[in-house]
Image (tube, rainbow, N blue to C red):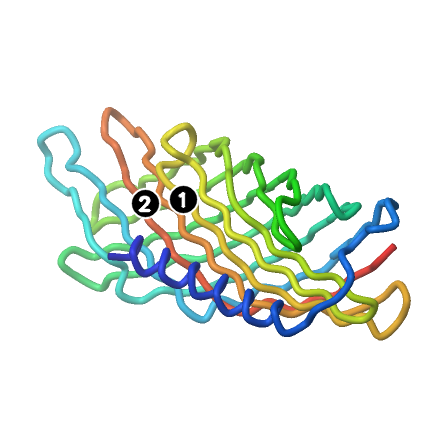
Amino acid sequence: MHTLRTAVLAASLLSLAGGAFAQNAGAQPGEDGRWHTNVYPVLVWLPIDIDTSINVPPISGSGGGTTGDILESRFDGAYFGGLTVSNGVWRVDADGMWLAFGGDRPDHPFLKVDYDIIYATARVGRRIAPDLFVTGGVRRIALDYQVDIADLPRLARKPGVWDPLVGLGWHRVGPTVEWHTSFDVGGFGAGSDLDLGAGVRVDWKPLKHFGFTAGYNLLYLKLSDDVLSRTVEIKATLHGPSVGLGLYF
């Protein structure tokens, strides 16, 4: 159900952004053939909804397994930074993010989970229609998680995976306003089981090389990790607004 809701929300973000782009006609970015660079040194993400669940099999005949949704989620912080280089036909995007969040379930049985996620993404895009790009890339995900179940010993792991990515991007660049939207799907069992990301962003450039950016981002992650001959399954969905600064060259 979470996967379906995530896909629907991602499609809605793209639809809304597409409507905005259609109402904001302008010249294609980089038609002069020069390369243009956007640097986002500070991007703050503020998720307003966090859904997490975890499935921990029993420990070698001793019981203690648990599965289900976290009932009381919490968000501890996030940081984004990004870089884009484009010349109209080609786009290269790179960004990094740190997330810290967790959740609790008071009983049946008691469950507490804490996550730290660091990921870095690199994509190459090729324009296939006005403002529309097909993209491919890779995402590195480093996950540090701790799970406390009732009075059992703490389960702590730091798995890291490489996820292949494919997706679409829609980018409309003007002298003072830029619109950006993207959708990526990855993992496919090569790294995580499933990795979905979507975002909509608008940049306002009141000065030649300086501006502000605001948008909305969504992340869904499903990851299986082998621990002591058990497979722990983690699912997390986060979405919310983002704000930051941009430098344009």
Q: Compared to 56, does 111 lie above or below?
A: below
Side of 14 where 42 appears, left or right: right
Q: Nearer the viewer, residue 184 or 161?
A: 184
Quadrant (top left/top right/bottom left/bottom right) for the N terminus? bottom left
Q: Residue at x 73, y 49 (%)?
A: 83
Side of 243 where 158 appears, left or right: left
Q: Nearer the viewer, residue 164 or 87?
A: 87
Q: Residue at x 40, y 44 (%)?
A: 145
Q: Compared to 194, does 216 lie above or below?
A: below
Q: Compared to 169, does 9 lie above or below?
A: below
**Circles 2 and 1: CB atoms closer than 8 Å:** yes
Q: Compared to 156, does 170 lie above or below?
A: below
- Residue type at mark 1 is Tyr
Q: Nearer the viewer, residue 115 or 233?
A: 233
The disc at residue 145 is: 1
Give the image quarter of residue 52: bottom left
Side of 4 where 164 appears, left or right: right
Residue marked by disc 2:
234
Q: Residue at x 66, y 68 (%)?
A: 202
First in sequence, mark 2 or 1: give its number. 1
